[in-house]
Amino acid sequence: MHVIPIKTLRMKSTLLFFLVLPFLSLAQAPVFDYGTKSIEARKAYQTGWEQILDLGQWTKAEESFRKAAALDPDFKLAWSQVGRISNDPVERASIYTKLKNVLGDSSWESKLLEVYMGSLQLIDARDRGQAIQPEQVKQFYEVSLTNFSILQESFPDEPYINAEYIEVIHGIYGAKAALDSMELQRNSGRKTTPFLASYTSQMWAELKDFNKANEALSTLKTQLPDSNFPIILFTEANLFFEEGKLIQAEKLVNQALLADPKHTLAKRLKKRISEELKKQKAE
């Protein structure tokens, strides 16, 4: 989901095998039930992840997560996603209070919930205008890396756990490490999802290799039937931004927000574009 609300904290390490080890085995893995016995609730939950990561449809994803929570009111992970997307600070605080008491056991569900609760805390602090200390961000990333790596080894075929794990790798180690991990997946025979195509484009754009960023963007466009999907508009806007083509970037990010006003990443990109345009006018 990539909802870290402040500038990422880079931590140095040469132990890249720790990043890519979970991608090396494609043996038949157990299915993760995400902490719900309701097949319909789990289906709605996974649909929400598909919408938010593969299509960039944050509004529809929120509806799917809320549906999952309604189908199973004890579905903790579904409630955590509602809290992360919700723009209502009162609702978010209520969800956080409800969920924080279930942390601490050794279940797979609890390991994911620990990550999402840390994310929810940072989002809430940002929205309330509270100062976020670097140590808070560091702790969040350390917990995320540990828990996601364990989950990846146990459930290597869960694409949306994998997607967020890649984002954590990027947040800690940078774009090149994220690209290395995604490349290892492709070499192991894993399907390139729209999320992975988009994220590959974003990482190459960050590294200023615009030819490869465009190649990944082209792959993304072949995977989806409509060029107006928010994920395509956002990815292309991001590429223009990294190229310094701010007017084109602004036009596309505005289109992305028209397609989905709740697209958090597009809103952040729009803010960055506006700041750069102001700098140019001041010069």
Image: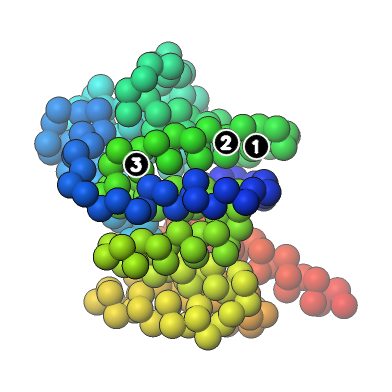
**Number of the label disc, if any, that sits on residue 153:** 3
Q: Residue farthest to the top?
A: 101
- Label 2 vs 3, first from the N-terminus: 2
Residue at (44% x, 53% y) in the render: 20
User: Which residue is identified by label 2?
Assistant: 142
Label 2 crowding class (10 Å Cα cut-off): few <14, some 14-19, many 20+? some
Q: Is residue 131 above or below residue 29?
A: above
* Residue 130 in sight: no
Q: Quadrant of the C terminus?
A: bottom right
Q: Is residue 213 above or below residue 14?
A: below
Identify which amino acid the numbered label 2 is placed on. Glu
Residue 204, position as x, y percentages in the image: 55, 73
- Label 3 vs 1, first from the N-terminus: 1
Identify which amino acid the numbered label 3 is placed on. Glu
Question: Real-space Cα distance between discs 3 and 1?
Answer: 23 Å
Residue 76, position as x, y percentages in the image: 32, 26
Front-lying residue, 12 or 217: 12
Query: Splitting the image into 4 quarters, where does residue 282 fall?
Result: bottom right
Residue 266, position as x, y percentages in the image: 51, 62
Image side of residue 275 versus residue 234, left or right: right
Image side of residue 31 versus residue 156, left or right: left
User: Which residue is identified by label 1?
Assistant: 138
Question: Real-space Cα distance between discs 2 and 1?
Answer: 6 Å
Front label number (3 vs 1): 3
